[in-house]
Amino acid sequence: QVQLVESGGGLVQAGGSLRLSCAASGRTFSSYAMGWFRQAPGKEREFVAAINWSGGSTYYADSVKGRFTISRDNAKNTVYLQMNSLKPEDTAVYYCNALRSGVLPASDYWGQGTQVTVSS
């Protein structure tokens, strides 16, 4: 079981920015596509952003396109999510996971997540 540790969340006002980090264990981290997901209060977990094994290709949900940027540093076994122009509807717990196919999570393991709260 691969360990994933999310961090960087917090409480911000609308229009503000946050940078999330996801630190992963494993010597072969660089072989996996990675993704960010989020779960808002009373809602199911949803896909947010994806990045391929090399970091050369990315994909975003329509709701965050143009505002969020996913990146990775394979030498540090870490994937990032830069969030700009935050909106109250971005409020959620944010999780990372490897991707098995398309935007589907590869593992049943989920870390503790990191809370993002955006006030209006």
Image: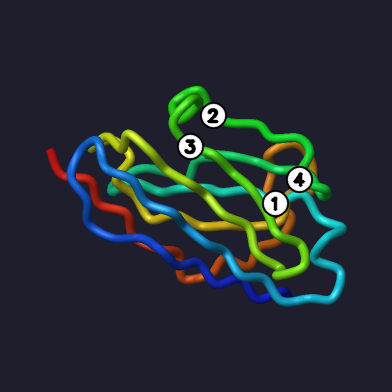
The residue lying at 67 percent from left, 71 percent from top is 24
Q: State which tag comes first along the sequence, 1 or 2.
A: 1
The secondary element bearing badge 3 is classed as strand
Q: Looking at the image, what colour scheme do you see? A: rainbow
Question: Which mark's residue is nearer the viewer, 2 or 4?
Answer: 4
Q: Report the side of 60 relative to 24 (left or right).
A: left
Residue shown at 51%/57% (left/top)? 95
Q: Quadrant of the N terminus?
A: bottom right
Amino acid type at mark 4: Gly
Read off the residue under disc 3: 68
Disc 4 target residue = 55
Q: Residue at x 76, y 45 (%)?
A: 55
- With 87 as the anchor, is 57 left or right in this view? right
Mark 1 or mark 3: whose residue is earlier in sequence: 1
Discs 2, 3 touching: Cβ within 8 Å: no
Going by the picture, which residue comes out furthest to the left? 120
Helix or strand or loop: what does disc 1 sit on? strand
Q: Secondary structure at mark 4?
A: loop
User: Which mark is on residue 61?
Assistant: 2
Q: Is residue 45 above or below residue 109?
A: above
Vertical side of 66 occupied by 93: above or below: below
Residue 96 drawn at (x, y percent): 58, 57
x and y percentages locating residue 28 in the rendered image: 86, 69
Label 1, label 3: how far apart the Cα atoms are: 15 Å
Which residue is denoted by mark 1 in the rendering? 34
Q: Which amino acid type corresponds to the residue marked 1 in the rendered image?
A: Met
x, y (%) of residue 114? 40, 63
Inspect the image, locate mark 3, and give the three-letter code of the amino acid beneath it. Phe
